[in-house]
Image: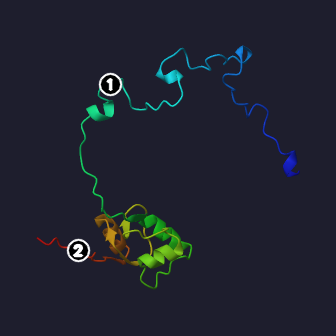
Amino acid sequence: MKLHELSDNPGATKPRKRVGRGPGSGMGKMGGRGIKGQKSRSGVAIKGFEGGQMPIYQRLPKRGFSKPNRKAYSAINLGLIQKFVDAGKLDIKSVITEDALVASGVVRRKRDGIRILAKGDVTSKLNIEVTGASKSAVEAVEKAGGSLTVKAAAVVEASE
């Protein structure tokens, strides 16, 4: 089989509808736009416009606050770390740091730090050092005989 011999299944592709090409096309004369009015003409941009009425996105109340400088952590489950240990991609003899997790491919990038969550089972004795961890994750690692250390993040004190 060659590239020029490839073709799609019959009926998989349809030719596009050519609008405004005569009465025989079924989309002639007004081209499916109806008669007169703003929307029949070109250059119309009225996405949220409601004819002068207050639009719904302005009528509804706004709540909450999005912090512009919030920390974004990469979250990993304990089960995934155990899977990489079993596969031999993580060395349990040394301390498992954030850099080791990125190097082994458990997580793609550190972002503002890595946070360990407790989903999954831990059977190996792991020594992990990360930016954050849930209480249940710390308990699960310690129950397996390891230790999960949370690094103290640099606390920025507000000067008054």
For image coordinates 36% across by 67% down, the residue present is: 115
Q: What residue occupies the far left of the structure in this picture?
A: 160
Residue 32: quarter of image = top right
Helix, strand or loop for disc 2: loop
Q: Which mark is residue 155?
A: 2
Across and down, in percent, residue 25 comes to: 72, 18
For image coordinates 43% across by 79% down, the residue present is: 96
For image coordinates 41% across by 65% down, the residue present is: 74
Helix, strand or loop for disc 1: loop
Can you tell which of label 2 and label 1 is closer to the viewer?
1
Q: Is 130 placed left or right of 100 in the picture? A: left
Q: Is 96 placed left or right of 19 in the picture? A: left
Dot 1 corresponds to which residue? 52
Q: Residues within 10 Å of mark 1 (few under 14, many from 20)?
A: few
Q: Residues within 10 Å of mark 2 (few under 14, many from 20)?
A: few
Report the amino acid beneath label 1. Gly
Closer to us: 35 or 124: 35
Residue 58: quarter of image = top left
Q: Please, is residue 159 above or below residue 52 in the view?
A: below
Q: Is 31 placed left or right of 67 in the picture? A: right
Q: Please, is residue 127 above or below residue 44 in the view?
A: below
For image coordinates 37% across by 65% down, the residue present is: 73
- Residues at marks 2 and 1, CA–CA distance in whole angstroms: 50 Å
Report the amino acid beneath label 2. Val
Closer to us: 125 or 153: 153
Q: Is 44 placed left or right of 145 in the picture? A: right
Check the picture and name the quadrant holding the C terminus. bottom left
Across and down, in percent, residue 9 comes to: 78, 36
